[in-house]
Image (spheres, rainbow, N blue to C red):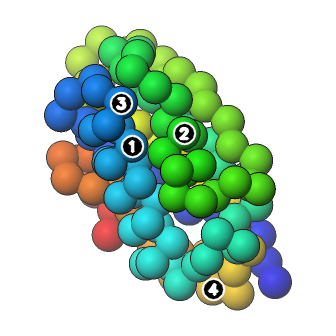
Amino acid sequence: MAVRAVRGAVQLEQDEAGHMDEQVGALLTAVLERNGLTPDDLISVWFTATPDLHCDFPAAAARKLGIVDVPLICAQELDIEGAMPRVVRILAHIESDRPRAEIAHVYLGAAGALRKDIAQ
């Protein structure tokens, strides 16, 4: 079994904890489904949030999905002028037999504009 990394992002409409839970939960669910994964396949997940998000930790959404025994960490994105606002990004380390080229990176909604080269 190989160790792979999968990326993803979602843009929130507002800085509100319930909305963050919903959107980050949808992102994590899509990453798992599109890559044929279960939470047992997760090694760790890094979450970043743009500096304009203050309502909650993005990792809290993972815990609410039942991802409770996977190391999770949150960090703040760089505050770059002109960057897309209210974005949560993930970098998940996974165990998968899929070749690297077949990993499905997930960019939901407007966040698809961030990585048109790999968004699916």
Residue with the mark numbered 1 = 21
Answer whether labels 2 and 3 touch (C-beta < 8 Å). yes
Q: Which residue is mark 3?
A: 17
Q: How far apart are the two marked residues, 2 and 1, measured between alpha carbons?
A: 7 Å
Question: Is 12 placed above or below 45 here?
Answer: above
Q: Earlier in the sequence, mark 2 or mark 3?
A: 3
Q: Earlier in the sequence, mark 4 or mark 2?
A: 2
Disc 2 marks which residue?
60
| Callout 3 amino acid | Ala
Q: Amino acid at mark 2?
A: Ala
What's the residue type where badge 1 is placed? Asp
Q: Residue at x 59, y 49 (%)?
A: 63
Please identify, in this view, whether the residue under mark 1 or under mark 4 is nearer the observer: 1
Disc 4: which residue: 98
**Marks 1 and 4, the one that precedes in the sequence:** 1
Which residue is nearer to you in this view: 20 or 76?
A: 20
Residue at image position (32%, 48%) is 23
Q: Secondary structure at mark 4?
A: loop
Question: Callout 1 environment at 10 Å: few (<14), some (14 to 19), or many (20+)?
Answer: many
**Residues packed near mark 2 inside 10 Å, few (<14), some (14 to 19) or many (20 plus):** some
> x%, y% of residue 90?
52, 47
